[in-house]
Image: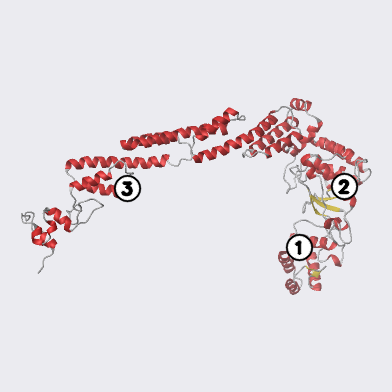
Amino acid sequence: MQVSPIAAVAPTSPTSQTSTSASSRSGRPELRGMSYDEQVAALAPVQMKGAPGAVEGGDQGGPKISKGAAKKRLDEILDPSNTPLSDDVVGEARSLVDRLGDKKQAEYGGALDARVASGEAEARLGALLDHLDAPITAAATAEAEGLIEKVADNRRAPWAAKLTECVAWGAAATEVAEIVEGASKPLGDADVARAEALIASLPAEQQAKWKKALALRVENDPIEAQLEAGLSAGGMLTQERVDALKALIGTLTNGRGAAWQKRLDDRVAADAAQVFEGDEKTRSTALSTMSAEQVTERAGDKKTRRGKYKGDQLTRVEFDKEHEVSVSTLKGLKTGDYAANVEALVAEKSEHMNLSQKALIAKAKEFLSKEPKPSGARAAFAELDVPANMAASPDLSLDGDLIARMKRFTRFAAWAGLIGAKPKVNDGVRSPANAHKLSTRYMFTSGIGLGGSGNRKVVADWAIAHNGKADDQQWIPTDLVAELKAANGDDAVYKTVLIDKVKTRITQQVDQAAEGYPEGEKRMPNVRPTGISLHCSGQAMDVSYAWVFSNSYDPMIDLLAAYFGLWRPVKDSKSSPEYWHYEKLGSVVASDATAD
């Protein structure tokens, strides 16, 4: 029976190695001259992580490897040129150290521990110093300096150089920021040259950032210098200066427009405070250096225009009763001499007016006598465009005199700085059928007119007789008509059907609207006791103005409109305060005002 080569050389005991060579018994001449260990390695080589001499079948501590091979592999691992050691390599190195004698274990073990500590320090240094996008902080610099002390001597210099570089460009970036962002005055040539030199010393990604910032600073400095001069100048700002400063702010490209606009707003508010809110001495001093034109212009200032007024455009808020201008008061102007009545009303209210409000009355008179044209930005708000479908219908045209008065009133509002945008005409001529729809929809959707059982019965009886249809409009769906019929006069059912169900199927109408037809069959199903809308006769216009007043019901609007022969007859209605609805009231006060 043939014996395997490995079996032939396997010793039976630690003393079984004799002078008789295993090669002579195995018939392997290539093994002649080798020691026993060399023959085993040649017959069954199994390398361990690249360490020469490692073989399977070692002792209980792991694969068997010679001390020389372990030292050679450890020298490779601990070579200074290696990057920080991975966990796998550290584990391999520790197993190799265990193969060494006590003296060498202490030597290589200490070197390995130092190398591991150095690697950990280098990993943290990389996190601190690599890919910085902002100047390194003092705390990070101190930490890095401590870590460099833990790095192996032969690897310390590159990290020290990298830290020095980071600190240097951080200082350069900080100085650039102080020049470009911190300087309060326009940059001089020397400042720009210094900033450019510093930017050149920064990393590439930092250079791009600060080159752009410096270019914006150089571009915007002259503009900001003009703004600073304009806002620092003494005296009251005229509207022309305010407009010019606003235009300059609009040309800024460095994102500082909002800050300058706030400064301008604060300056305008401070100017107004001197005139309208200071004590008598302060006001007298300010007025001595302020023209009548400037006083009038300040009337558009937010702080001034509020006066005693409170509230917003959606809520009707009264002030003191002495200052209120009610619809009934305005209606009384038509009795007798209209122009004299307007002047008497203004004289009565002037006791409660502040300086800016009195100036606006003077401006209205001046405008009506001279018809000056708005200029600058205000000219864009001066035109009142009436859409063709609102100016005329197949049977009717909007009153020409009403249009002329509204256009004149609009030009005045723009010239006096009382509106901040071009006004919009929302309605003019309205057909009776359309007026009927608006009025009836409002009756259903608001419940107005159907609050009493008598009105509900009238509508229910009509719906049953006409199947819910009138004026080419199916006001009550046929299925709900059937419910009304089945109710047999039960008001609870009428109320549920007419108020709760019908309104959900009718287009919402949130604003009060007058009727298009007189009382009678044609008006049905609307039973609201309202007159016929003046839109149906071309005697009313709905116009939305972007008033500078904080409250669209401001009585100053009514006093000023009265000079132009206009009023807002439904502005006091609690159910539908239509401050946008204008009608003719009397004649235009200034007799020499030019016609449109």
Point out residue 337 in the picture as x, y percentages from the top left corner: 94, 43
Q: Is residue 503 above or below residue 241?
A: below
Q: Label 1 neighbourhood size at 10 Å, few (<14), some (14-19), many (20+)?
A: many
Determine the residue positioned at 27% across, 43% down. 78
Q: Label 2 neighbourhood size at 10 Å, few (<14), some (14-19), many (20+)?
A: many
State the CA–CA distance, disc 2 to disc 1: 35 Å
In this figure, which residue is indicated by the disc labeled 2? 405
Q: Amino acid at mark 3?
A: Ser
Earlier residue among tags 1 and 3: 3
In this figure, which residue is indicated by the disc labeled 3? 86
Q: Amino acid at mark 2?
A: Arg
Q: Is residue 180 visible?
A: yes
Confirm or deny contact between disc 2 and disc 3 (CB under 8 A).
no
Q: Amino acid at mark 1?
A: Phe
Earlier residue among tags 2 and 3: 3
In this figure, which residue is indicated by the disc labeled 1? 444
Question: In the shown orientation, is residue 128 left or right of residue 196?
Answer: left
Determine the residue positioned at 54% across, 37% down. 210
Please tell me in which quadrant of the rendered image residue 188 appears: top right
Please tell me in which quadrant of the rendered image residue 248 appears: top right
Q: Secondary structure at mark 1?
A: helix
